Image (spheres, grey):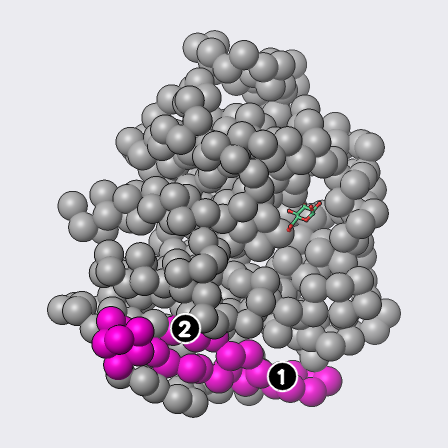
Amino acid sequence: MQPHLISSFATCLLASSLCALELPNPLAGADGQVATTPDAWQKSVRPQTLQIFREQVYGVRPVAKPAGFQAKVLREDPQALEGLATLKEIEITFTGPNGSAKIHPVLLIPNAAKAPAATFLLFGFVKPDPLEKSNISGGWPVREILTRGYATVAFCVSEVDPDRADGFAGGVRAIFGNSPRPANAWGALSAWGWGASRIMDYLETDPAINAKRVAVIGHSRCGKAALWCGAEDTRFTYVISNNSGCSGAALARGKMGEKISDITSHFPYWFCENYRQFSNHEERLPIDQHQLLGLIAPRLLYVASATQDDWADGKSEFESCVRASPVYALFGKPGIEATSLPPPDQALLGGTIAYHMRSGKHDLAVSDWQHYMDFADKHWKP
Ligand code: GCU
């Protein structure tokens, strides 16, 4: 076995070949040095690992908070949802060398809150519409969230960077991009996460929000984006991946269902160009996705799968949590509380990494949200 590769814990009970997989050691940097203290991991292993994911998978962001950043509240309704919440329609403008664009997140703050509220920031596929969709779609169950005392904000990822192969010219990557695009240039997933960070820039200025308790949450492609967002921006203290699968929470090595060859041929624009070289060559990857989960440490992390979601591969997502846990252990925190897959619908909330496999299909259901809020309650309302 090469020194930077480790196999799973001897105690692994998961009835799967994943247990025997050799994966890069999440405590080792690209230089092969293994961190034995949190400080060494933060100062050396974390930046090296992050840089590999930037260069080889999601791409390098050319800018953080841009000089031309502006955020304002366009409209405020203090009695939204029959008085349950204050609704703020926000407009964020970013300007770069090649133009400017605006995004329009919608923020809801519970009127019953007695202190700045912890907040769930949702990466949305569509324009957020809490008034019409709140009780219809599980995707953003705003009444449930507000009733439990949390604020929530959602945005449409396509406003940041259009979610289509020819969308490049219409989004933030073109505004800050250069031509020709280098092979490590950021893909759409990273651009969406960048947009969430700009919403965080606004949330830090809103006195109704506790900016130290903001969770990012996304489903499927948005789950991948939420994980990468949490890796890039440590201001998010809770990161939630709902059915993110390939190039999200699931391991690349040994994964069933969708592979890098599938995702880079159907959705090449989600990633940097360099990622394609690992199509059918997962073994050449210098990292694997458990190290993406490790980049969230020591913050709260929740990974959820669904029993009928073979394309995402829930077993691989679970194993990824197990393999990321040594990073949490280095910080003296429990990672995931078990090394064997729990029965469907039983949430493992006892560690700093939480996990459940919901019965049913690929979806973001209200029951998923309930588990995510239970985990937040445990840590934020002890
Ligand atoms: C496709 C893709 C997945 C992705 C999903 C989604 O199925 O292959 O990787 O998660 O779309 O975002 O809906």
Q: Where does the image place residue 66, in percent across and percent down from the top left?
A: 55, 79
Q: Which residues are magenta?
A: 79-107
Q: Which residue is mark 2?
A: 131
Residue visible at 34% across and 72% down in the picture: 108
Q: Where does the image place residue 130, in percent across and percent down from the top left?
A: 42, 70
Quarter of the picture containing the C terminus is top left
The kind of secondary structure element at disc 1 is strand
Quadrant in the rendering for residue 119: bottom left
Mark drawn on residue 101: 1
Q: Residues within 10 Å of mark 2 (few under 14, many from 20)?
A: few
Q: Amino acid at mark 2?
A: Leu
Asked if residue 25 shows in the view, the reply is no
The answer to if 91 sits in the magenta stretch is yes
Relative to residue 217, is residue 207 depicted above or below? below
Q: Nearer the viewer, residue 247 or 24?
A: 247
Relative to residue 223, is residue 121 depicted above or below? below
